[in-house]
Amino acid sequence: MRMSRHLIVRSAILILIVTVPALPREGLSVVSLVEALKANPNDAESWRELGIILFENDMTDRAGTCLVRAYKLNPEDGQTLFYLGLFLEDKQKFTLALRLYSRYTKIPEASPYREAMEGRYRILTRRRIREDIRAMIQGEKALDMRPPTPGTVAVMPLAYKGADAQVAVLGKGIAEMIMTDLSQIKSLQIVERLRVQALMDEIALGQTGLIADDQTAGYGRMVGAGKVVFGDFTTGGKNRMQLDVVCGDVINKKYSDPIILRDAVQNVFLLEKELVFKVIGEMGISVSPSEREQIQSFPTQNLQAFMAYCKGLEMEDQGRFAEAVEYYNQAAGLDPDFQKAVEKSAVNQTLSRSQDRRALRFGNVMTARERQDFRERPPDISRQMLEARRMQTVHQDLGSMIRTGVDSRKSPEESAIAETGGASIEDALSLPDMDRIDWGTAFEDLDEPPDPPSLPSVP
């Protein structure tokens, strides 16, 4: 007996999704979700689950429509926000994705999607900062859009002028200590290390359009700083270290005489404190007793732990987050009281797990129950695979009875769809309100992320 068209379409859909990841709600399939939505178009959970199934099977446009609908019905659902963010990234709509991911703070901490959203937020923020800096250096974005303020300070990594490559990474760590200490002064605002490092990376690539005699002022303006601290350090015989640091006034283009300090490398923590108070003096800033006490505290006094921490900073700046975690953990192991190393390790673990968007869809962000429920994603049915399946079918049919009207060269997947009269899964999903997304209104309730993006927990 010939099957009805309706049943054939359903069979075709089931063949296509036979190994689609199972979902926490049991018994779900494209067919059941379609039926549920026809009965109740305001079922946010079904819109979400249908969107996820389609997204995982690379039916991106239709998945986006479903996920947007789910978002409109329930804008606080972490799973919807996460997958919708991935969809927006696929569509190269990174600003919208950033705005969406910035809501990770509103997701319960127990949700696996909170960390996933936070990781993508941090990664996209890094990307946005670098793009902004690159655009300014290349002259594509005006430098004076955001005039520098006198109380904003940018601390550049100290350049190493010595011959021992092993200690070169100290320049990043010393600069970060200076930033941390200056941040204790309430009248100052410190430019994020991430933004400063993005600037230094672009400068290192030789993409400078600034006048040589005015580089420092120009660099300061790019990151909105009214004051800059920059310089270099060297190491030499008897394990000695010398710091040469200048404090610059970007607005008035005035620079202090070099602050030159020398001591043993093992006393780098004392050197840094002495340097900070001299920089404060050059800036003409009054420091309260409580601020002075905070500045005088040490994050660590273990040189080996600090060296490992500096290597972690280097790996993080290169986007090698898993390696950064190893160095931060090493630093925390050498000094269990080194709290900044512990915090950095946690941040970079999130970044590492969130770095690969595709891995996120089946990776560590899922709970143990979800991982148990998920099955392997089916391979794509490529042209080469279909040709191979056709040859296999032809071989199996040799010597058998040939049925009139049936193309025995087709694979089972092709035949199931062909027998519907050309209907595809897209045709089978002709639901109400499955129109093109109006990007002008779909996310109008999303707040703009701060510009420049604020990362208070990432120094």
Image (cartoon, grey):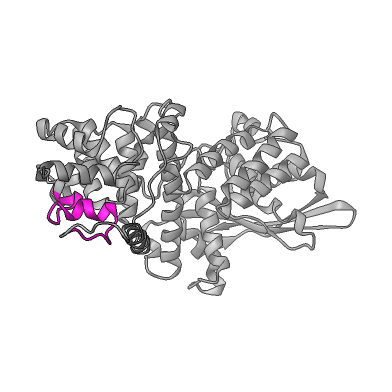
Q: Position of residue 12 (x, y in %)?
A: 21, 46
Total marks in image? 0
Which residue occupies 51% across, 71% down?
208
Residue 127 on the magenta span: no
Note whether 125 is above or below 76 in the view shown: below
Q: Is residue 183 left or right of residue 426?
A: right
Q: In what quadrant of the picture does the N terminus appear? A: top left
Q: In this view, does 30 lie to the left or right of 308?
A: left
Of residues 437 and 371, the one nearer the viewer is 371
Q: In what quadrant of the picture does the C terminus appear? A: top right
- Residue 99 can be seen, yes or no: no
Q: Where is residue 436 in the image (x, y as percent from the top left)?
A: 15, 52
Note whether 230 is above or below 280 in the view shown: below
Q: Where is residue 141 in the image (x, y as percent from the top left)?
A: 37, 65
Of residues 82 and 51, the one nearer the viewer is 51
Of residues 225 and 420, the one nearer the viewer is 420
Q: Where is residue 83 in the image (x, y as percent from the top left)?
A: 33, 42
Residue 242, quarter of the rendered image: bottom right
- Residue 58 can be seen, yes or no: yes
Q: Is residue 251 left or right of residue 264?
A: left
Which residue occupies 56% across, 72% down?
213
Q: In this view, does 366 lie to the left or right of 409?
A: right
Residue 420 on the magenta span: yes
Residue 254, quarter of the rendered image: bottom right
Which residue occupies 73% across, 39% down?
305
The magenta stretch spans which residues? 405-427
